[in-house]
Image (tube, grey):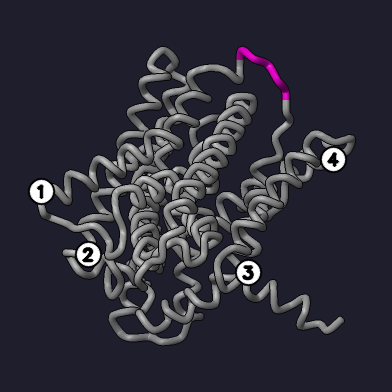
Amino acid sequence: MKVSHITDPIKDLSESGKLAGLLLILSTVLSISLANSGRAGSYLGLWHMEVGFDFLNESVLHWINDGLMAIFFFLIGIEIKRELQEGELAVKEKAILPVLAALGGMIFPAIIFFLFNTGSAEHLNGWAIPTATDIAFSLGILSLLGKRAPLSLKIFLTALAIIDDLGAIIIIATFYTSQLHFWMLGIAVLFAMAMFALNRFKVKYLFFYLIPALGLWYFILKSGVHPTIAGVVAAMFIPREMAHKLELSLHRPVNYCILPLFALANTAIPLVFDSSRIFNGLTAGIILGLLVGKPIGIMLFSWIGVKTRVSTLPVGTNWKHIAGIGLLAGIGFTMSIFIAGLSYKDPATLDISKLSILAGSTLSALCGMGVLYFLGKNKFVR
C-alpha cells in the first residue's frame, strides 16, 4: 500500500474542515470513556496536577483553559479583524443579516435558559452557556454535506459564527470577570499600548510583538479579567500581513492540537445517573436553548431584517436553509463548555452542564444535517 493512500484522505479531510470536527468528537468520546473506566482516578488526577513557577502555579486544566485557549481566542481575534477589514463584515449590506442572525441567536437561548432556571440563583449564572456557537465544529458538520450546501450558506454561517464568537468574548469580559485589580489592569493596558506603538511604527518582526503580548496575558490574568481576552486584544494590534501569516500558521495547531486537548481536559465527566440532577431546569435550559432557542432567534431576526429590507437572504438559499443553519449554530460545544467552566465552581453542576451541552450540540448537529441534507437534493447554483 502506498503512503499516499493513507495521507491523501487525511489531507482531504483537513482541507474540507471535517477533520477538526472529527477530532473533537473522538477526543470527547475518549475522555468520557477514560473518566468512567478503571483508570478514572489517575486520568482525572492528571488534569488537576499542578505545574508552573513560583510566580504562576496552576493545574494542567487551568493552563489549557487560561493559557492555550488564549491562543485560540487570538486566532478568533485575527478572524474577526480580517472579516471587518476585508471579509463579509466589511460590506454593510452583507454584514447586516449575519449580525442580526447572531444577535437573535444569542438572545433567544438566554431567554429560554432564564425561563427554566428562574428559581435557582446558582443555575442562573450559566445563562450565557447556550448562546455560544462552536465555529470549527459547526463548519465541519456543514462541510460533511459537500455540494448539498450552497457556498453562500457556508459564508453566511462563517460570518454568523464569527459575530457569535465576538458576542461571547464581550459576555465573558463583561459578566464573567471576578474582582478587578486595577493596578494589574493598568499594567496590562501599558503592554497593549506598546503593541499599538509597534503597529504604528510598522514593526514587522513577530518577536517584538510576542514579548508585550505575553505581558498583556499575564497581567490580564492577574487583574481578574479572564486571560483569554488578552488573545483577542493582542490580535487587534497585529499588522494585516503578519496577521494573515499567523492565521494560516495557527489554524492547524489550534484545530488539531489545542481544541482536541481542550475537549480531552474538559469532558472528563464521570457519568452518575441521578435523575434529580439530570432532569432539571439546568439541563432543559441548555439543551432547549441550543436546539430550539438558536434556530428560532436566528430565523426571527433574519426574517425581520429581510422584511424591513435592511438585508437579503444569501444567494441560492431560502428560509428552510436558514432554519438548517440555525440548528447547526446550536452546536455550542467548545465555547459553551468554556463558558460553563466560568459559570459553575461546583463539580457536579459543571459536569451536568457539560453533559447537557454535549446532548444539545449533538441533537442540533443531527437535526441541522438532516434538514440541509434533504434540501440539498436539489442542485445549487455556485
Disc 3 designates what residue?
Answer: 13
Instruction: Give the vertical position of 278 relative to 292 (above or below).
Output: above
Which of pointers 1 and 4 lies earlier in the amino acid sequence?
4
Residue 279 position, x and y percent, is 57, 17
Q: Is residue 273 inside the magenta stretch?
A: yes
Instruction: Give the vertical position of 211 relative to 262 (above or below).
Output: below
Q: Residue at x 29, y 43 (%)?
A: 299
Disc 4 designates what residue?
Answer: 42
Q: Residues within 10 Å of mark 2 (few under 14, many from 20)?
A: some
Residue 308: image tag: 1
In the shown orientation, is residue 294 left or right of residue 28?
left
Question: Residue 223: in sight, yes or no?
Answer: no
Disc 2 designates what residue?
Answer: 94
Near-viewer residue (162 or 50): 162
Q: Residues within 10 Å of mark 3 (few under 14, many from 20)?
A: some
In the shown orientation, is residue 6 left or right of residue 347?
right
The reply to whether dot 1 and dot 3 touch (C-beta < 8 Å) is no
Please tell me whether the stretch drawn in magenta is mainly helix, strand or loop: loop
In front: label 1 or label 2: 1
The type of residue carrying mark 1 is Thr
Q: Residue at x 32, y 34 (%)?
A: 108
Residue 261: image tag: none
Which of pointers 3 and 4 lies earlier in the amino acid sequence?
3
In the shown orientation, is residue 26 left or right of residue 194?
right
The type of residue carrying mark 4 is Ser
Query: Which quarter of the figure has residue 188?
Result: bottom left
Please identify the residue farthest to the front as the structure is shown: 378
Secondary structure under tag 3 reads: helix
In front: label 3 or label 4: 3
Secondary structure under tag 4 reads: helix
